[in-house]
Image (tube, rainbow, N blue to C red):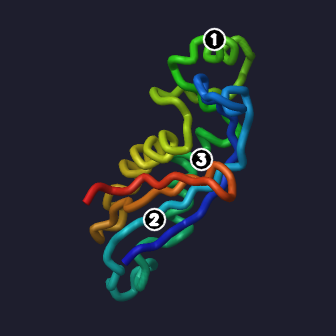
């Protein structure tokens, strides 16, 4: 069984070597769809009976593991030294330094890596992260999938 939860957050980024406008500092209203696979819990009387996972638990885990860190932060590539140093000079600025250029594709992969560890068999029902879909805009998204 597959279940999906959608969360949204705001963040800034830039693509340092982009040939067009995305090389400039800018931001997005990102949407994150998290799809989990697992068995439906059949334990009689359990709070999660009939569910793969309670959607509120799904949200709480994603929020703690990822959304709180990325929301209203600037997501910057560690190799973008000028911007990393600039942001470090701003007192109290919320900056997330990433090992990859913060494209939609790379952010989806990074989110999958973070969330995969956070959801690891939380309910004991063979729960596993199946897909992370990251919308950079309403019309553009990237999917990170569990390898077959």
* Marks 2 and 3, how far apart at CA: 16 Å
Mark before the other along the chain sequence, 2 or 3: 2
Disc sitting over residue 126 in the figure: none
Q: Which residue is mark 1?
A: 82
Horizontal arrangement in the rendering, residue 22 relative to residue 109 (left or right): right
Check whether the beta carbons of the residues at disc 2 and disc 1 lie within 8 A of each other: no
The crowding category of the residue bearing disc 2, from other C-alpha atoms within 10 Å (few below 14, some 14 to 19, many at least 20), is: some
In the rendered image, which residue does mark 2 sit on?
Answer: 35
40 to the left or right of 66? left
Q: Which residue is mark 3?
A: 67
Mark 3 vs 1, N-terminal side: 3
- Residue 96 in the image, given as x and y percentages of width and height: 58, 29
Question: Tag 1, which secondary structure?
Answer: helix
Q: 67 or 21, which is in the foreground?
A: 21
**How many badges with numbers are in the image?**
3
Front one among 20 and 60: 20
In the rendered view, would you say 123 is above or below 52?
above
Which residue is the extreme one toward the bottom?
A: 44
Whichever of labels 2 and 1 marks the residue nearer the N terminus, that label is 2
Residue found 38% across the figure and 51% down from its top = 116
Q: Tag 2's secondary structure?
A: strand
Badge nearest the viewer, 3 or 1: 1
Q: Position of residue 49 (x, y in %)?
A: 41, 83
Frontmost residue, 145 versus 37: 145
């Amino acid at each position: 069984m597959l279940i999906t939860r959608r969360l949204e957050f705001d963040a800034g980024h830039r693509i340092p070597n982009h040939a067009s406008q995305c090389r400039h500092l800018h931001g997005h209203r990102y949407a994150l769809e998290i799809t989990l696979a697992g068995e439906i819990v059949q334990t009689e009387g359990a709070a999660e009976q009939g569910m793969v996972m309670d959607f509120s638990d799904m949200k709480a885990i994603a929020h703690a593991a990822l959304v709180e860190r990325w929301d209203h932060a600037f997501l910057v590539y560690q190799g973008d030294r000028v911007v990393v140093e600039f942001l470090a000079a701003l007192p109290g600025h919320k900056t997330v330094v990433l090992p990859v250029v913060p494209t939609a594709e790379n952010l989806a992969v990074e989110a999958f890596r973070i969330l995969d560890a956070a959801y690891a068999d939380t309910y004991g029902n063979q729960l596993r992260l199946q897909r992370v879909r990251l919308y950079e805009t309403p019309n553009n998204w990237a999917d990170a999938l569990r390898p077959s």
